[in-house]
């Protein structure tokens, strides 16, 4: 008979497999089996070490060869006592014959309640919260905003991650929510797909469903996943959807609410991705006069720590997804930022300017969210003496 410890170990392993189920649904049995095996192996080899390396040195460190080796070595070190604990019953039975291990009522209760808890938490995080969109609503005051642009509504939607986890039927409610906000402009700061460039067509089809009041009012900048899955495909599908693509480029929203390459008004600037591209903040903003307001799209909020120069009124970002999992008092185990948990989500004061970090619409990596629901953001603009962001109910 298997020992209680082995039962717990098997159930825990099954629990790990369970959280990947939504990702493999819809794939062929062979593909799904391979994916599950790879994921399980990846988690077993890297999971605990990855959390340590990410927590100590930042998520970016886990991507290098050195980081991967460190993840693996740390995992081995961390698993050592666990493996000994699992093997203990075997070592503890030397030569003397012993009665076979009994599955007691207590062990069944422990294993059963563990399985029920894991199933409930997995179901909540993987089936409910991951698709439970929240609308964050703010009034944003900007100095020098032309009076004609007061009341302008801007919707922000980062990190769609169209792919195996985020199917069009999961993302369409976010598009509908954005349209219900009756936006003048929609800002999309990157990471449109995950896993394959084939999903850019889905991202393009979703972007074409957005209905900003201003013509050509869907403005795009790029994220690391867009580069990983094929930036040329990204450009092709998002421009086909009628989006404005900004790579270290800017457009101005004139007082008569038209987007133009030059003029005076509210500037919308899009930076290249920090990890895979070459963001150039100073060059992008160089042609903007000091008395004109400017918003900057930057997929990765770490740019605020690394690029300085001209004034930025507000940078809007995504990328970190709020960590996707937030454990009360402990925070987020994995956050892809070089600056700890600072840029997890919400309004953050950087060294020189403020950054609003959206939690993202889709999810990547683990197909779940816990304590970090997906987000669509809407800002209504007012003229003010300084940049402020306050809650408001608009929709
Ligand atoms: Fe992302």
Image: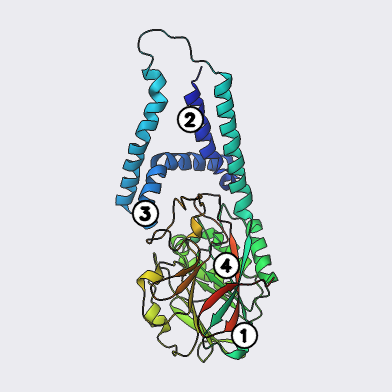
Mark 4 lies on a secondary structure that is loop
Q: Disc 1 designates what residue?
A: 150
Q: Can see residue 87?
A: yes
Mark closest to the chain's N terminus, 4 or 1: 1
Q: Which-is-in-front pick, marks 3 and 2?
A: 2
Q: How far apart are the two marked residues, 1 and 2, measured between alpha carbons? A: 59 Å
Q: Which-is-in-front pick, marks 3 and 1?
A: 1
Q: Which residue lies furthest to the top in this view?
A: 97
Q: Disc 2 designates what residue?
A: 9
Q: Which-is-in-front pick, marks 1 and 2?
A: 1
**Which residue sits at x=37%, y=7%?**
96
Q: How far apart are the two marked residues, 4 and 1, measured between alpha carbons? A: 21 Å
**Along the horizontal axis of the image, is 328 left or right of 208?**
left
**Which residue sits at x=50%, y=65%?**
318
Residue 306, horizontal then vertical, whole percent: 35, 71
Q: Nearer the viewer, residue 250 or 12?
A: 12
Q: Which mark is residue 63?
A: 3
Q: Which-is-in-front pick, marks 3 and 4?
A: 4
Residue 339's quadrant in the figure?
bottom left
Q: How far apart are the two marked residues, 3 and 4, measured between alpha carbons? A: 26 Å
The reply to whether dot 3 and dot 4 touch (C-beta < 8 Å) is no
Q: Nearer the viewer, residue 105 or 279?
A: 105
Mark closest to the chain's N terminus, 3 or 4: 3
**Along the horizontal axis of the image, is 353 left or right of 265?**
left
Q: How far apart are the two marked residues, 4 and 2, measured between alpha carbons? A: 40 Å
Mark 2 lies on a secondary structure that is helix
Mark closest to the chain's N terminus, 3 or 2: 2
Q: Which mark is residue 157?
A: 4
Rendered view: 236 above or below 336: below
């Amino acid at each position: 008979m298997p020992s209680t410890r082995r039962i717990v170990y098997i159930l825990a392993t099954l629990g790990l497999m369970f959280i990947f189920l939504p990702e493999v649904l819809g794939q062929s049995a062979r593909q799904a089996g391979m994916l599950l095996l790879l994921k399980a192996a990846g988690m077993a080899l890297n999971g605990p070490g990855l959390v340590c390396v990410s927590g100590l040195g930042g998520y970016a460190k886990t991507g290098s060869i050195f980081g991967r080796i460190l993840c693996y070595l740390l995992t081995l070190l961390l698993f050592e006592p666990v493996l000994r604990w699992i093997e203990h019953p075997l070592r503890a039975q030397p030569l003397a014959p012993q009665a076979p291990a009994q599955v007691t009522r207590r062990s069944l209760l422990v294993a059963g309640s563990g399985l029920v808890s894991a199933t409930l938490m997995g179901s909540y995080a993987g089936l409910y919260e991951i698709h439970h969109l929240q609308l964050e609503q703010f009034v944003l005051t900007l100095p020098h905003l032309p009076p004609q642009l007061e009341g302008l509504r801007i919707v922000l939607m980062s990190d769609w991650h169209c792919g195996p986890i985020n199917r069009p039927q999961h993302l369409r409610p976010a598009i509908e929510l954005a349209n219900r906000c009756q936006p003048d402009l929609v800002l999309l700061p990157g990471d449109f797909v995950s896993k394959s460039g084939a999903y850019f067509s889905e991202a393009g089809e979703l972007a074409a469903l957005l209905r900003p009041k201003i013509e050509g009012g869907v403005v795009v900048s790029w994220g690391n996943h867009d580069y990983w899955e094929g930036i040329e495909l990204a450009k092709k599908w998002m421009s086909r959807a009628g989006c404005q693509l900004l790579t270290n480029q800017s457009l101005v929203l004139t007082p008569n609410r038209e987007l133009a390459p030059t003029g005076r008004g509210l500037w919308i600037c899009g930076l290249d991705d920090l990890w895979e591209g070459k963001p150039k903040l100073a060059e992008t903003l160089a042609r903007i006069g000091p008395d004109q307001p400017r918003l900057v799209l930057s997929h990765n909020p770490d740019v605020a720590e690394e690029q300085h120069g001209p004034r930025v009124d507000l940078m809007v970002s995504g990328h970190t997804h709020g960590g996707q999992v937030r454990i009360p008092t402990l925070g987020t185990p994995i956050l892809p930022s070089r600056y700890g948990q600072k840029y997890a989500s919400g309004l953050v004061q950087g060294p020189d300017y403020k950054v609003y970090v959206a939690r993202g619409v889709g999810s990547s990596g683990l197909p779940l969210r816990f304590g970090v629901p997906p987000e669509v953001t809407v800002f209504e603009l007012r003229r003010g003496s300084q940049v402020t962001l306050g809650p408001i109910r608009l929709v």
